[in-house]
Image (cartoon, rainbow, N blue to C red):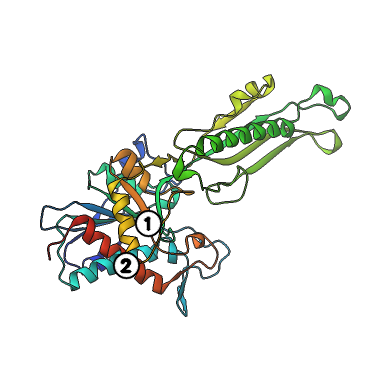
Amino acid sequence: MQRALHALFSRLDGQSSLVPMPESLRSDPKFASGVDVPFAERPQTRFRWQGAGGGRSLIACAHADVVKGGDWENALVPQIDGDRLIGRGAVDDKGMIVALFLALETLQEMRKRLDGDLECHFANEEEVGMAGALAFVRAGFRADGVLVCEPTDHNIYIAHRGSLQFSIRVVGKQAHLGRKRDGVNAIEKAAKVRGGSRQVRRSLDRRRSGVSPLRKLRIPRPGECGYHQRERFLLDRAGSGHNGGWCRLSAESGHDTSPDGNPGAIAAIDDAWIKDHVTVGFAGMKNDPYEMPQGHPLTEMLISTLQQFGRTPEVLGMMATCDARYYYNQGGMASIVVGGMNNGQAHAKYEYAELSDILDTAAEYALFFLEWCGSAS
């Protein structure tokens, strides 16, 4: 995929290059990938269109990876049905990559020259912790603003929640069924732990209510099914028949975090057994939240651009996590998220993008590039 992108963008005026991802990235304190696949032979594409000078610079980032097809047979075989392009990744995030390419190609065919530099980053591993975006940031690439291209239904996201994957192991005490009072049921104790998790969830909801970009988020509760929210219980039973008792329980789950809160439920539970017999491990994604200030010039200019197309974009917080967090939190760059229709199709079975909307999105990107970077031609 990356080599195909490199070849595609090499057709444009500018410099397209394949940038290696160093294995040393794994020791970075902010590395949060949920997979362990070597980076060798998996470079990332960077395209740079140098400006004439005097304008603001911009990075446009989109990710090249997709989630698995699951039980969707032939998910990676694209199909066109009328105005719909159906296939895994059509909307998340290949449609946005195509919109970026068309925007640049059209500007160059119109012989437009931007004043500020514009570069495109096509990242790996966005779906599993955003290691690719971290690699770009740690390589030192900087700009006056970052446009993260994700399907947003033409709204603007200036914040997103965090995502923390963790595992919980609850140890009980085995006892004969006739002396069950002498035992400890791990399932019952786990229910208390889950209840404590719900208390943290409600606390985060209250905190989020004061963070305006996140007010309208409809966050799944822990244990509900979702890509970043999953809960799996693994039971180990000691003994056999009616004399056995549930004595150990392990659970894997996910919690979302808001910019001012992180989960910490177990210490607050008033149960001496739980304090001594519950262990928590943190493996997998550890995605920090991010939040841009209200009224930033990057946001205000994008609102103005979209209004010229007859749109009235909402400025919101994003329920998922994305590459914007690394550009903003670690790179110190103003970062916002915007893209085309069918946000709800991301990760869905029979995911589709509308071809006409990809063209509309390309036009919006092109005008925003002209207005943010400036153009005398």
Say if mark 1 contacts mark 2, CB within 8 Å. no
- Characterize the local packing of mark 2: few (<14), some (14-19) or many (20 or more) Cα atoms within 10 angstroms: many
Query: Do we see residue 14 in this rendering?
Result: yes
**x and y, in percent, of residue 3 in the image:** 29, 63
Q: Is residue 169 above or below residue 50?
A: above
For the C terminus, give its image quadrant: bottom left
For the N terminus, give its image quadrant: bottom left
Instruction: Left or right? Give the position of 99 relative to 211.
Output: left
Residue 250 falls in which quadrant of the image? top right
Q: Is residue 146 above or below residue 279?
A: below
Q: Amino acid at mark 2?
A: Ala
**x and y, in percent, of residue 322 in the image:** 41, 49
Instruction: Left or right? Give the position of 259 relative to 295.
Output: right
Give me the C-alpha separation between circle 1 and circle 2: 12 Å
* Residue at position x 71%, y 28% in the image: 172
Q: Nearer the viewer, residue 317 or 86?
A: 317
Q: Amino acid at mark 1?
A: Val
Q: Nearer the viewer, residue 206 or 264?
A: 206
* Residue at position x 37%, y 53% in the image: 337
What kind of element bears circle 2?
Answer: helix
Residue 22 falls in which quadrant of the image? top left
Q: Nearer the viewer, residue 78 or 177?
A: 78
Instruction: Left or right? Give the position of 136 relative to 231.
Output: left
Instruction: Return the mark for residue 360.
Output: none
Work out which residue is located at the far right of the displayed protein and give it.
Answer: 178
Residue denoted by label 1: 338
- Characterize the local packing of mark 1: few (<14), some (14-19) or many (20 or more) Cα atoms within 10 angstroms: many
Instruction: Return the mark for residue 362.
Output: 2
**x and y, in percent, of residue 2 in the image:** 31, 61
Q: Is residue 224 above or below residue 270?
A: below
